[in-house]
Image (spheres, rainbow, N blue to C red):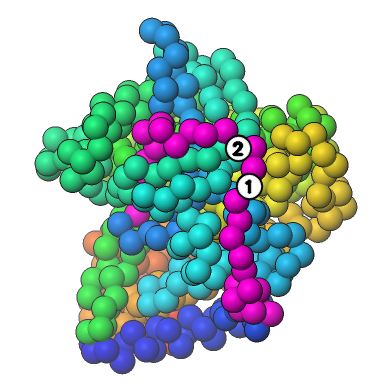
Amino acid sequence: MNGSDRHELEMIAREAMRAHGLEPDFPAPARQQIARMGASAPDGLRDLRSLLWSSIDNDESRDLDQLEVVVDDGPARARVLVAVADVDALVPKDSPVDAHAATNTTSVYTPAVVFPMLPLELSTDRTSLNEGEDRAAIVIDMVVDDGGRLVDSDVYRALVHNHARLTYSAVAAWLDGESAAPDALARVDGLDAQLRRQDRIVVQLQARRDEEGALEFDRTELRPIVDDHGVRELRAERPNRAKDVIENFMVAANGVTARFLASRGLSSIRRVVRSPERWPRIVELAARHGATLPAEPDARALQQFLKRQRSDAPEDFPDLSLSVIKLLGRGEYVAERAGDAAGHFALAAASYTHSTAPNRRFPDLVTQRLLKAAIARASAPYGLAELTALADHCTRQEDAANKVERLTKKAAAALLLAGRIGETFDAVVTGAGPKGTWIRLFQLPVEGRLERGAEGLDVGDRVRARLVSTDPHRGFIDFARA
């Protein structure tokens, strides 16, 4: 492989964007808006810059959407504050930049190129909560007791300051005692204790979520590593303690946001995972592992089964986890009147929205505008009919973005596997239906289509498969049953 692989992956990504109704480039009016953009200095914000805010994100992330800090509030409770970048301050509703964001509705991450929802001048600079910068933010303020229960909350606008840009890998390695502390911990007085406090609170929050029936899956993701020499490796990105901190804080903040909007009488866009589409097949998979699930969907029963399997058979859990995720069905956005609640099956949450990533997801920017109206007790910037249309559009575009990301990851994997035609691999079936049967390899985090020998197979079945062909341009990795 050589540098031409990167160019090929970029071309494949751009073609896929257009084919799925996404815009790979910013239109001229949006570029002109950025060129004319002046300063934004909102008045009347609470000044919280002295708090020990920090960000934790991926090593390569430059669009920093949120900061976190814990403020002690007594021996048996603590305040967890999540600050979310005030993107709306520089991206007004219906402006050219907003129109482009509303078209794509999400940033699209491919191995060779990223298609940001917002121009980089904003998402990695002026609307990013960058280290050493004062920024306007929406703060979700949560009081948590020592049992991980949320006992009070508030939402307001504030001025914040990121004292340290940290990464998941460095913080997790330090928390696990596997490496020295990140440099920022020596530079920022009290930050080490702050991070350990966050880590302890997350243990309580996670335990509480477990009690409520939240499902926990293996969340390993494929990440092709591409440089000027081509596709270097297929890396498996795994969960860690630092990611657990951010995930739990974001889940809590998104729940508070949904309830806050409802309390102020505003309709909103919610994130839901409805009752599983293929629950009988989940019951069948559980029976193969010696477990009995009820005939009707039951999140708590499924959670207990998954926890036992993670403990008893950790080597098999990633494949079981992926099978259950596929059988649960996709998440989607829905618009709801205040007081209604379509739940999130996987999170065991009755009220849940997306609000913490407005640089990367359009539903979060819409929610931010609703929050600012609710805080000011002003009229809502969106009516229910507009929110309904937006929710449907965002779900479709998220699906389109996922298809682009899957295609380009498969294209990178196809380039890497081109020299291994004829080899045989152990795999698990991840999809089965009229359109075909798909498998994922155990040795490599690669998914492909089983072209021959798929009769009688269903999601979760084990199979031996031989690699028969690859087509990077179409993202095809084809196997035959061995």
Residue 179's x, y, as percent? 12, 42
The residue drawn where x is 53% and y is 24% is 142
Front residue of 103 and 92: 92
Please determine whether, in this image, residue 225 is positioned above or below residue 366: below
Q: Which residues are magenta?
A: 29-58
Callout 2: SS: loop
The residue drawn where x is 47% and y is 85% is 12
The residue drawn where x is 56% and y is 37% is 158
Asked if the residues shown at circle 1 and circle 2 are in contact, with their CB atoms under 8 angstroms apart, the answer is yes
Front residue of 19 and 119: 119
Please determine whether, in this image, residue 262 is positioned above or below residue 414: above
- Residue 30 within the magenta-colored segment of the rendering: yes
Residue 220's x, y, as percent? 35, 52
Please determine whether, in this image, residue 417 is positioned above or below residue 374: below
Q: Quadrant of residue 156?
A: top right
The residue drawn where x is 53% and y is 64% is 122
Q: Amino acid at mark 2?
A: Leu
Q: Which residue is mark 2?
A: 45
* Residue 60 visible, this orientation: yes
- Residue 458 within the magenta-colored segment of the rendering: no
482 sits to left or right of 367: left
Q: Amino acid at mark 1?
A: Pro
122 sits to left or right of 416: right
Residue 162's x, y, as percent? 39, 44
59 sits to left or right of 268: left
Q: Residue furthest bottom?
A: 4
Q: Which residue is mark 1?
A: 42
Q: Quadrant of residue 50?
A: top left
Where's the C terminus, which quadrant? Answer: bottom left
What is the number of the mark on residue 116? none
